[in-house]
Amino acid sequence: MTLMVAAIANGEHRVRMAGIEFHTRVEGKPGAPWLTFSHSLATDLGMWDAIVVGLSDRFRILRYDARGHGRTGVPDAAAVEATNFDRLVADAVGLLDHFGIARTDFIGVSLGGMTALGIGLAAPDRIRSLTVIGARADMPAPAQQIWAERIEAVRAGGLETQLDSTLARWFTPAFKPRAPEELARIAAMIRTTPVEGYVAAACALRRLDYVSRLGAIRAPTLILSGTVNEPMLEPARAMATTIPGARFAGIGEASHLVPVEQPAAVLAHLEEFLANRP
């Protein structure tokens, strides 16, 4: 695929697409291979800061706020309940088109990791490699019910209803005394996520079902999971046995939001993987 666009300046870019204005950031080395980063539910592109700083001297980097998150617009009411991963994948591919990115290494965590799986299936010609962090490939019925309850609670009382339980799932107990400022920064992202943005992403998560298709992914794939993240650890291992040639690594002293809790470890795995993938 050949995409022709004008030279892209480093910095913030607003992209109007699918009825929403997306907030994006381009940085790194012009002319270098592209990396694209996709964040988790209830955060924004800033959650990748510690990872990007270690890669920007060798790569061209695109980060974006997912629909209804950060400084990206909120979908209209009709689109919220209909949100699925087909829509989130189309958003990501649309941004690649906008910036003229023919191929990219795509790196996602949680919601972003599941988006990565979807792109690997729907647009394999656009992907050089996939890195999937803290993610799974399906949502069993009990988990679907949990997401339904979270949606109800957020609609009734806002994101504050999810703050403490989310931080407890995302980080180990040792993280708070070790990095209080970083924990506070993530807490602020959760608090300021628009209700409709959270609900749209949660609706997609309830519908997640890639398990039967994982064997069709052909991109080199790295799967990372915090070893303290019990709900995701075994599903992550299982994905690595299903995706042809996929590699799995567990990261100790980390729960769900591994790139924030253990950025040095994630960066080390990424650097080795990117240096040696075909």
Image (cartoon, grey):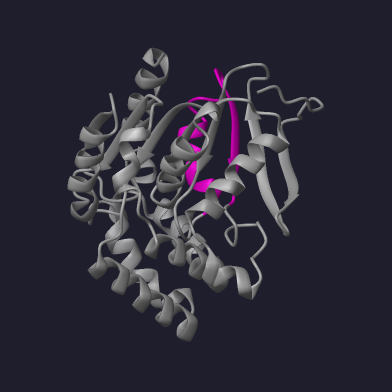
The residue shown at (38%, 65%) is 206
Span shown in magenta: 44-65
Q: Residue furthest bottom?
A: 156
Residue placed most toward the observer, 145 or 152: 145
| 62 relative to 219 in the view: left or right | right
> Residue 91's x, y, as percent?
61, 48
- Quadrant of res 130: top left
Question: Can residue 252 be seen?
Answer: no
| 152 relative to 79 in the view: left or right | left
Specify whether residue 62 is painted magenta: yes
- Quadrant of res 125: top right
Number of callouts: 0
The residue shown at (46%, 84%) is 157
Q: Is residue 94 above or below residue 2?
A: below
Rendered-image quadrant of the N terminus: top right
Residue placed most toward the observer, 96 or 7: 96
Specify whether residue 6 is painted magenta: no
